[in-house]
Image (cartoon, rainbow, N blue to C red):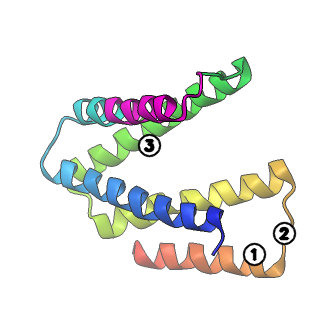
Amino acid sequence: MNTPIVLAFISLICGGLATFFWKIAGRNQVYSPSYMVVETLVFCGVAIIIHAVQRHPFELSNKMTVLASIGGILAAISVYTILVAFRLGGQGSVIFPIISLGIVVSVVLSFVVYREPITSSKLLGLGLGASAIIALST
């Protein structure tokens, strides 16, 4: 298995666990902004540690700084709305599949923005994946 695929699987497991922790937080009626602050501080701390270990200076172009800022705003909105949905009694078996449809947005944008090849197998896979997610959420 090649390195990008291994890294994707690590991300899948860590992301899945982090997302499940949102359900636990919601079930425990956390105040969403407080949870988000702690999660963000730890995230930032890990990034700083990685910088220190790799001995790499902080560098980011203005364009990428704006992109990262917009991404941060969108991620904050996403996490906040999910935490509130769980705090209001949303079921993980419904909420998780719905938020998983976000992958469809990413794939379509990859096709459009980066002109990645669209093959029949990719379209079939995307359709089956989206159908499975929709079926899980009903």
Please tell me whether residue 48 belongs to the stretch shown in magenta.
yes
Q: Quadrant of the C terminus?
A: bottom left
Q: In the image, is 55 to the left or to the right of 117?
A: left
Q: Any mark on residue 118, and which? A: 2
Q: Marks 1/3: CA distance? A: 26 Å
Residue 78: image location, x then y, percent: 44, 43
Tally of numbered discs: 3
The amino acid marked with disc number 3 is: Ser
Residue name at image x 75 percent, y 75 percent: 123
Q: Which residue is mark 3?
A: 78
Range of residues picked out in magenta: 41-57
User: The disc labelled 1 sits on which kind of residue?
Assistant: Leu
Disc ID at residue 123: 1
> Distance of mark 2 from mark 3, alpha carbons?
28 Å
Nearest to N terminus: mark 2 or mark 1: 2
The location of residue 1, given as percent across then percent down, is 63, 76
Q: CA distance from mark 2 to mark 1?
A: 7 Å
Is the residue marked by circle 2 packed among few (<14), some (14-19), or many (20+) residues within 10 Å?
few
Q: Which mark is residue 7?
A: none
Crowding near the residue tagged with mark 1, few <14, some 14–19, many ≥20 C-alpha atoms within 10 Å: few
C-beta proximity under 8 Å, tags 2 and 1 = yes
Query: Tag 3's secondary structure?
Result: helix
Q: Main secondary structure of the magenta part?
A: helix
**Residue 88 visible, this orientation:** no
Determine contact: label 1, label 3, CB under 8 Å: no
Q: Please name whichever residue, 23 or 98, is drawn nearer the observer in this view of the structure.
A: 23
| Secondary structure at numbered mark 1 | helix
For image coordinates 37% across by 30% down, the residue present is 45
* Residue 86 showing in the rendered view: yes
